Amino acid sequence: MEPSNDVALDIIITNVVSVFRTRCHLNLHTIGLEGSNVIYKPEMGKVLMKLRKPRITASIWSSGKIICTGATSEEEAKLGARRLARCLQKIGFKVRFSDFKVVNVLAVCSLPFQIRLIEFTKNNRPIASYEPEIHPAASYRIKNLRSTVQVFSTGSITVTGPNVQSVASAVEQIYPLLFECQKTRS
Amino acid sequence: MMLSNANTLPKLYLSVIEDVIESIRELFSDEGVEERVLDNLRQLWESKVIQSKAVEGFMKDSNPSNFVLQLPANYSQSLHKPTVVIPAAQNVPSFSSKPTLHVFQSSCGSVATFSLPAGITYPVQIPAGVTLQTASGHFYKVNVPVMVTRGAQHVLNPLSHPAAVARSSALTHLSDPAPAASVCETPPNRQSADGALLSASDTQSEFTLDGIEFSPQLADMSTPPAQALCSDHSRQQTETSFREQSTALPDLQTEAAPDIKLETELQTDLKLNQLLDITQLDGVADSSSDTEEEDEDDDDDDLGLVGENEFLGMINANEEEELEEEEDPLNSGDDVSEQDIPEIFDTENVIVCQYDKIHRSKNRWKFYLKDGVMCYGGKDYVFSKAVGEAEW
């Protein structure tokens, strides 16, 4: 059996994290009082603002740096970030939407076979690491893509990377390696 | 469930009002404000609570076996101890629930129909000099003693029949409790003078109290012309006791306005005193143009850093500069569409309380609250513990 390269795998993006800056100081107290759907956490020095439309949660710091999490695609992340900046603008701050960057994309994928992790780790010695006492998954770091794949014995994998493209590439790259070590062979 | 709240709430509110009034009595006298103002304040407060209908059965004389004629206690000075108790000679019904007097006013404002809940056995005698308070907060003074029996629904039109005013104060009894019998006082005058006779007597629980003069009192300031008219009527009465009341009433009415003014003046004076030593830089004296100035001030503090970054950004490349500018058009708020569901819940339902714990997991919220008052659907509910769950 040769590993086919035309497997249609469902890569589901579950989280896209992005940052941007408003280029102005933000008064968290004001945002906490006047903003809608906000949670003020003075002990951590930030305000959480949740949006419904793209379902995202943003952490807002007084420096004007904002981290936006929960989006399901890069476009959605940008849209949500802009909406958020608009909300802040409405409260009265001189907000500029600058330095938007997607920093992390998390995707999950379910492979149709189970995996022998010990064999997988042995085959990919320096790149893969597996410590079952610490974490039940083997982690595989792809340096050039700056992505990490966590492989579980059930065949589920999670992929994190700086953008969606790298995540997709990572899955493509790791698939044959995992196929080699699947549990069906006995 | 809410019944228990309804029983204790009026007492609670009354006790709150008592406490506050008593505790500020000294302060008021120190400031040189008259007792009358304090009484006025209390009366206003109580009438507002009643008017808001947030509390049911807000009574002073808690006498559950009677029918609720809510007498404002501060009228005792002008009224001569009105007897709320229905005389023992009558069959005093024992009510399980407190009946309240509902008054419906038609659009012309001069007609009133009373209705009592069905639990009352008629006849019911209302002695003279009693002021009735309706659920809506209006006060009606019973100038002439009446007997109320079940009867056809009559529409009372006191204002248009000044003849009714000069009636004698003699107690007139209606002898026959027959269902078709109408409630009236001086039968010939009144009945002929009756306006539209609504013959629908199906609603047996409804009846009209003829012969009751209505002089809405100062608690209901919304109908001043009716007030003036009624007070005129009331002045024409011959009975001395009522004259006292009636003269007291217009006095109260006219005094209400200056009293309120006095209070507000006092408050503003106090505020001014506090501010004397502090010069005001914002508000009128603000030199800056708009609110966004605030942020510029804050910006100035770290302008150094931000400025440097921007400066560097500009130096690097023209392309980068263009990029930055392209990023910016947030300001065209058109594409960045606004939250389209924003204020779906501008409600009047509020809870004011303290919290034990507020917890959130993802979008599930749990509230553990304590010691609070909730205004829901116009009604007030007080609690010592409340637990809530919500999904955002």
Image (tube, rainbow, N blue to C red):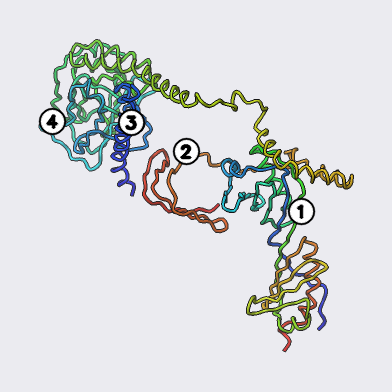
What residue is shown with label 2?
B348
Q: Say if B118 sits above or below A182 in the image.
A: above
Residue A3 quadrant = bottom right
Q: Position of residue B297 (x, y in %)?
A: 68, 36
Mark 4 surroundings within 10 Å by alpha-carbon count, few (fewer than 14), some (14 through 19), many (20 or more): some
Mark 4 or mark 3: whose residue is earlier in sequence? 3
Mark 2 surroundings within 10 Å by alpha-carbon count, few (fewer than 14), some (14 through 19), many (20 or more): few
Q: Secondary structure at mark 2?
A: loop
B188 left or right of A59?
A: left
Q: Nearer the viewer, mark 2 or mark 4?
A: 2
Q: Position of residue B140 (x, y in %)?
A: 28, 23
Q: CA distance from mark 1 to mark 2?
A: 42 Å
Q: Secondary structure at mark 1?
A: strand
Q: Nearer the viewer, mark 1 or mark 2?
A: 1
Q: Residue at x 26, y 14 (%)?
A: B247
What residue is shown with label 3?
B24
Q: Amino acid at mark 2?
A: Glu
Q: Amino acid at mark 3?
A: Ile
Q: Residue at x 74, y 38 (%)?
A: B331
Mark 2 or mark 3: whose residue is earlier in sequence? 3
Label 1 close to label 3 by CB (< 8 Å): no
What residue is shown with label 1?
A101
Q: CA distance from mark 4 to mark 3?
A: 39 Å
For the residues beneath circles 4 and 3, the answer to whether they share a chain is yes
What residue is shown with label 4?
B87
Q: Secondary structure at mark 3?
A: helix
Chain letter of disc 3 in the image: B
Q: Amino acid at mark 4?
A: Pro
Residue ranking furthest to the bottom: A186
Chain letter of disc 1 in the image: A
The dot on residue A19 is: none
